[in-house]
Amino acid sequence: MKQLVRAFIAVIAIALALMYVTSVLNSEQGYSGGNTLTVYNWGDYIDPELIAEFEQETGVKVIYQTFDSNEAMLTKIAQGGTTFDIAVPSDYAISKMREEGLLLPIDHAQIPNLSHIDPRFMDLSFDPGNVYSVPYFWGTVGIVYNPELVGGKTFRSWNELWDPDLRNQILLVDGAREVIGMGLNSLGYSLNDTNEEHLQEAKRKLERLTPNVKALVGDEIKMLLAGEEAAVGLVWSGDASEIISENEKLDYVVPEEGSNVWFDNMVIPKTARNLPAAHAFINFMLDPEHAARNAEYVGYSTPNKDALALLPEEISGDKRFYPDEELLSKLEVYDNLGKRMLAHYNELFLEFKMHSK
Amino acid sequence: MRSNARNYYLIPYLAWIALFVVAPIALIVYYSFHDIEGGFTLDNYAKFFTPVYLKMALSSFWYALLITLFSLLVAYPTALILTRTKHKQLWLLLIILPSWVNLLLKAYAFIGLFGTYGLANALLETIGIGRKQILFTDFSFVFVAVYIFIPFMILPIFNSLEEMNKSLIHAARDLGASAWTTFRRVIFPLTLGGVKAGCQAVFIPALSLFMLTRLIAGNRVITLGTAIEQHFLVTMDWGMGATIAVFLVIIMALIMVVTGQGRGSIR
């Protein structure tokens, strides 16, 4: 028993000593106090050179951490115990965080580069007046397809996915809003529709799609489509551009009935410690030259109109990823439908998944 | 005095049970009585008895049963052969080895193997059958699950075979029983404890599989585990997720009671 107690005390003593050593090391590296900035972003979603430049320019040390879903990010910030100064959530997550009081207002006076953002991407429903968020990247939801595997067919409408020739050829992304939204859009309804009849109609229509659906998958969808495992996929435009850069044969289209347009915005969570550096970082990323380089590196669509002008014609002129005004007017942002409606969407999605072929 | 000291030794054990067994289950039960906005409700339980969740429970049960059955069919003969080999421990180690590799990695490897242009299809094509869809089918799901669970079935069966008194087999053969009769009347009944322990070790986790249902079955197989994952991570409907978990706990307890009659021999 005595030995046990001794061993126990030894372990605690070692742990305390290690804690002290880490804190000393951290302060030597400048990882504490006023001159660091903790950025919490999606994986592979920034040009690392820009971080180095920002550090050089401002003398602020950047700690870069990544997440792979809005939900994971939300939970981590809501739980506390973190010191994120910047986070990059998507539209609906921003409105949720706003409601739950997890965000600090952004001081527009400290961000002169805000003027470079296309006004079309400002003042959107998830954050009126951009009090809490500043656009980072945006994109759409659409169809990626392999012309060779579908016999040269091209897609213009959601309804073409119901073609019996596509039996077992479609991969869907495992997201309730995306899939139910596609069902609603294909019927001409809004993807934020909460009318029970419309939702049931969309579910019945989706159930008729099941013979064509090979699988509903997560991030693997990129690997599977690029590897020609299936001919058609329902994906986000960012994933589409990644798939196309891996396999040139594939093409991307946003169906004419309309679809979702999404935004990833920079926000300052309430866990922030270094507000001046957070504002400086946002301003730095909005600089047209920086934003253009970042867009070229990441491959997503930039909301920065002056950065767009700096991008090569083959990127900025690509209608697939920078759709024209006409199509853009048909695209909708996901509204925050509230927990209850979202649960209902998920319930319908679950029923759709369980519908056997 | 002696018994007092013994009681002190019980403290860490009791603390462990209270913190990591009783408290989580109590929390699950507590959450299951709350709706999505945090108010008290019994709706979650009513909802479980709607066709959607009943169907899901049935299909989870069915797949878990298939997985257990096939694991047993493969594991029993393997364990039997293992006990008769020369380097038992080495062979056993080789069988356990894959369980040291992360589940996610194994699942990704199977995506590659079973894909349209994967090894399995290349093989089918060379022998003239032609490409088939293997990935995202019931077959691939059950196959991969069996592959993952098989060590947990082999180990208890192997142990009970090892523990068995070998002279009983000789006696049976001496008395004129054929090899099959010896197996049916002597070996199998004496290792039933191992079989039961193995079935529990496979059936119970198989009931709440999730990840594999997406990666290997492409969400065409929906189990209660998938639904729990969705409710906790996506919908944030912790109440419904907890309710399903409560039912899983109940089902598992029932299974333990039903199969637990015999003496288990997991070591």
Image (cartoon, coloured by chain):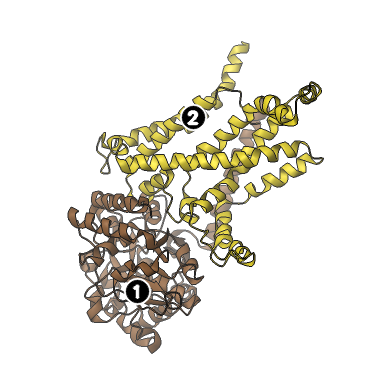
Chain colours: A brown, B yellow
Real-space CA distance between mark 2 and mark 1, rounded to the nearest whole angstrom: 60 Å
**Element at label 1:** helix
Where B42 sits versus B217, above or below? above
Residue lying at 74% horizontally and 39% vertically, measured from the top left: B82
Residue B146 image point, x, y percent = 57, 46
Where A276 sits versus A352, above or below? below
| Residue under pointer 2 | B255
Q: Look at label 2 and name its amino acid.
A: Ile
Quarter of the image where one finds residue A28: bottom right
Residue lying at 72% horizontally and 27% vertically, measured from the top left: B182
Of residue B235 and residue A79, the one placed in the foreground of this image is B235
> Which chain does the numbered disc 2 sit on?
B
Residue B185 visible to the viewer: yes
Residue A264 visible to the viewer: no
| Residue under pointer 1 | A283
Residue A198 image point, x, y percent = 19, 58
Residue lying at 60% horizontally and 48% vertically, measured from the top left: B147
Of residue B53 and residue A181, the one placed in the foreground of this image is B53
Of residue A111 and residue A75, the one placed in the foreground of this image is A75
Label 1: few (<14), some or many (≥20) within 10 Å? some
Where A259 sits versus A357, above or below? below
Quarter of the image where one finds residue A292: bottom left
Position of B222 with respect to B6 (left or right) is: left
Quarter of the image containing the C terminus of chain B?
A: top right
Of residue A349 and residue B19, the one placed in the foreground of this image is A349
